[in-house]
Image (cartoon, rainbow, N blue to C red):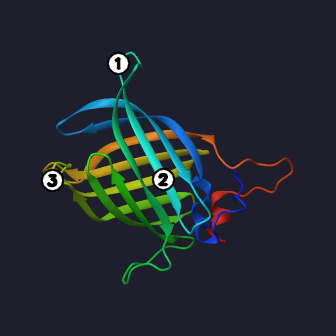
Amino acid sequence: MTFVIPSDLAPEVYPLAWVVGTWEGHGVIDYPGIDAADFRQRVVFDHDGGPYLSYTSSITLMGPDGEVGQVWSVESGFWRVAPSAPEGVELADFQHPLEVVLADASGLLTAYFGAVGNGRIDLATRFAAATESGPDVRGATRMYGNVGGELMWAWDMAAFGHELQSYASARLARVDGPAVPEGAETVGPDDAQES
């Protein structure tokens, strides 16, 4: 996957430049107590020149015949490359510490710590808090990866009295992103990591 680093993207988030844009695709939810279901997802990583990316995700269930069903999840938040890893956390070569804050319309607020590097993002909860009527989520991990130019992700959750296990995953294709001007020099995810 090649991409152009937007000219107004803050240098602090260059390690995340490869995800900037709009992604769409399909996935599946499968968790104890929740009926397995296929879904359609739209994810937007955007920026306004600040040292962070804004993030929105909308998951809509799909019916058995492929018809669009109800909205399952809507979340938004901010992703930023942290100035340093927490004390005691060692990162591999080309990895940068990452902090993510997400709010879900269901009443869940989650803060993640992780790392971005080599076309992969790994996140684990620092904390999860819910409103009085929000979901009982005790922890979660997420993994995002650039696989052949597509964004693959997996979300494991410890919720509703269950131990950490697979909750949802999807395969998304870029449908919109920074334009690549004719003759422009492009970079891959590993090139941006070194910036």
Q: In the picture shown, does residue 150 fall above or below 36? A: below
- Which quarter of the picture shows residue 32? top left
Q: In the picture shown, does residue 91 fall above or below 26? A: below
Q: Which residue is mark 1?
A: 64
Q: Residue at x 17, y 52 (%)?
A: 136
Q: Amino acid at mark 1?
A: Pro
Mark whose residue sits in front, 2 or 3 = 3
Q: Which residue is mark 3?
A: 132
**Of the image marks 2 and 1, the number of the one nearer the N terminus:** 2
Q: Is residue 16 left or right of residue 142?
A: right
Residue 102 position within the rendered picture, expressed as x and y whole percent measured from the top left: 37, 57
Q: Are marks 2 and 1 in contact (CB under 8 Å)?
A: no
Q: Which residue is mark 2?
A: 55
In terms of secondary structure, where does tag 3 sit?
Answer: loop
Q: Nearer the viewer, residue 139 or 89?
A: 139
Work out which residue is located at the far right of the displayed protein and give it.
183
Work out which residue is located at the far left of the displayed protein and give it.
161
Q: Nearer the viewer, residue 130 or 33?
A: 130
